[in-house]
Image (spheres, helix red, strand yellow):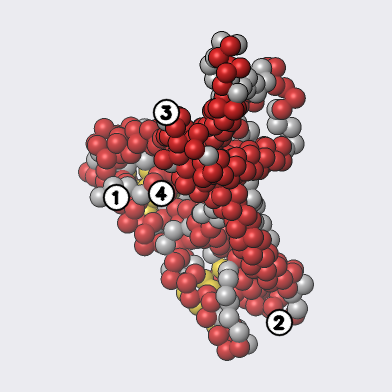
Amino acid sequence: MTPNPNIMQAVERLDYRVTVGDIASQAGLNVNVAQQGLLTLASEAGGHLQVAESGEVVYLFPQNFRAVLRQKYLRLQFQEWWNKVWKVLFYLIRVSFGVVLMVSIALILLAIAFIVAAASASRDGDDRQDSGGGIFMPNMWFGPDFFWFFSPNYYDQPQQHHLRRSRYDEKPKLNFLEAIFSFLFGDGNPNADLEERRWQAIGTVIRNQRGAVVAEQLAPYLDNIGQGYSREYEEYMLPVLTRFNGQPEVSPEGDLVYHFPELQATAAQTRPKPVSAYFQEFPWRFSQASSGQVMLAIGLGGVNLVGALALGKLLAGGSAAAALGGLVAFVQSIYWLLLGYGAAFLALPLVRYFWIQWRNGKIAARNEARQAYAVQLNQADHKLQNKIAYAEQFAAETVIGTDDLAYTTERDLLEQDVEHADKIDAEWQRRLNQGQT
């Protein structure tokens, strides 16, 4: 069984010594999943188990456990290699749409130029023969720095400092071909890790409250908390209880509070971690390309579509086009493909723009609802304050240090038995001395 990558990252962030509660809250994982994943990782990466006298278990991992796994698992080696290859392949896919656009424009303009030149030649062929003949080729000049657009490091060129991103601009630097892909398809789902971030935030809130919370403290991080009886009886807390092995407790007034023993044990003393007052979804952005790049993409798309329509008229109405052959014949054979690409190049971003507006409206509504729950928590009435005070009775934090260990798999069991025998004898002697006095 391959170790869970999320658990591996959490172990590294927590300095290689962790409890199940540490991993569950850090990675937002189900407690049972975290426990099983830690056992798997410890078994495969040469980790050690440290058992405290209270029965809590701490997992200790070597700092080079990734290297150990890499040598052991061919799959992990292949995954790392594929990640590197995929970055290159995906970059080529992204720039290919811009390349196709430029090729399409070039083919359309060249075909139009050939057809126009051939039609002019047919009207005054004698004059062209007297002047030396040949087909006129227009001088197409795009400017001295045009091809810098095709460089992945375009914005890093010294002479293009005026196009560099401002240090306060949040948009990443995109070259022209990357901007074309961003204009067409956007830049991915900004909430791809939505559930992972949500459960990490919930785990952090529970940890900051030392393992005991009320439902109102977690409502700003949840969706669909229900209406009527389902909300009154706090049914929306069931997924949280299931994920983190929580236990409901009932106050003398009949209110529910929630206790999470698994998240109260930690391998190291830590301060409360900062967490936002409510969970926020990120709005979708139309494109990370600059406004100038977007306008340039629209302009080139318009040139491509208008050129394709003009070429269609020339191909449909002129006999000279059919007689040219060569490049014109090739363009004629793929004409509908060029026209379709030109139409889709402008239609797809337009449809996507309105879809994003609709989607962001839904996101804003959910964010506002969660913010409202956070405001209610900050303006807690007397009843809610009593609930929170009752929950604090179950709050606790158990820090398992190296002095609290009963056994560890790092050392020989017989050696540890001798040490513990000495510790037990010393404890009995201390008690006898106290009894005599």
Q: CA distance from mark 3 to mark 4?
A: 60 Å
Q: Position of residue 190 (x, y in %)?
A: 57, 52
- Relative height, residue 345 to residue 371 (above, below): above
Specify the amino acid type for callout 4: Ile
Circle 3 SS class: helix
- Report the disc number at residue 383: 2
Q: Residue at x 37, y 40 (%)?
A: 61
Q: Position of residue 237 (x, y in %)?
A: 52, 75
Circle 1 SS class: helix
- Relative height, residue 7 to residue 113 (above, below): below
Q: In the image, is 101 to the left or to the right of 432?
A: right
Q: Are marks 3 and 2 in contact (CB under 8 Å)?
A: no
Specify the amino acid type for callout 2: Lys
Circle 4 SS class: helix
Residue 411 shows in this picture? no
Query: Which of 331/87 is in front?
Result: 331
Query: Which of 157/169 is in front?
Result: 157
